[in-house]
Amino acid sequence: MKLANGRYLRLVVSLYLDPERDDFLRTSMSLLQYQLDEAGEDWIFRYEFKREPEPGSAKPVGHVHVRGDPLCAGLLAKKQRLEHVHFPCGRPTIESVIRLLVDDFHVPSSAPSRVWRPALAESERDFLAVAHKAIPSI
């Protein structure tokens, strides 16, 4: 999706039903990526979530990638790039990414803050109320 600042937001979500457990739609995988180009090769940050970890992988099921090599030169192991570091995090919502884009990356919104902020907060509360019922405690 092209944003008002000419950059892009990619949202990919894979859903499934598990009728043996309950009637909730569940997310098996999601990707939220803020990028400079439409193809997504020149991305700035991305959130990744996979409900089931890859066999033998030590990656957290939810993590964030940030392209910031110029910001951390010399802080990581030799030849390690910041974009390949998996920062553990909670499962971000589309609402939290929208707030991040407007507040920190200065993407212009199409409506005044007094309109979209309460709507976003309500939408996020409703989603999280259902998401927490569907996801077992760890």
Image (tube, helix red, strand yellow):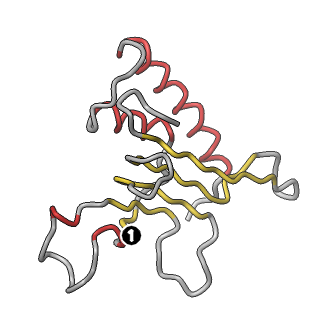
Q: Nearer the viewer, residue 35 or 88?
A: 35
Q: Residue at x 41, y 14 (%)?
A: 111
Q: Does 1 sit left or right of 136 as displayed?
A: left
Q: Residue at x 20, y 86 (%)?
A: 78
Looking at the image, residue 111 lies above or below residue 125: above
Q: Does 23 sit left or right of 14 as displayed?
A: right
Residue marked by disc 1: 86
Rendering coords of residue 35 (x, y %)? 40, 48
Q: Residue at x 49, y 19 (%)?
A: 119
Crowding near the residue tagged with mark 1, few <14, some 14–19, many ≥20 C-alpha atoms within 10 Å: some
Q: Residue at x 35, y 37 (%)?
A: 101
Q: Nearer the viewer, residue 58 or 11?
A: 11
Rendering coords of residue 40 (x, y %)? 47, 53
Farthest residue to the left: give it: 74
Q: Does 112 sit left or right of 105 as displayed?
A: right
Secondary structure under tag 1 reads loop
Quadrant housing the C terminus:
bottom right
Count the labels in the image: 1
Looking at the image, residue 107 lies above or below residue 15: above
- Amino acid type indicated by mark 1: His
Looking at the image, residue 2 lies above or below residue 138: above
Q: Nearer the viewer, residue 98 or 51?
A: 98
Q: Nearer the viewer, residue 96 or 10?
A: 10
Rendering coords of residue 133 (x, y %)? 65, 46
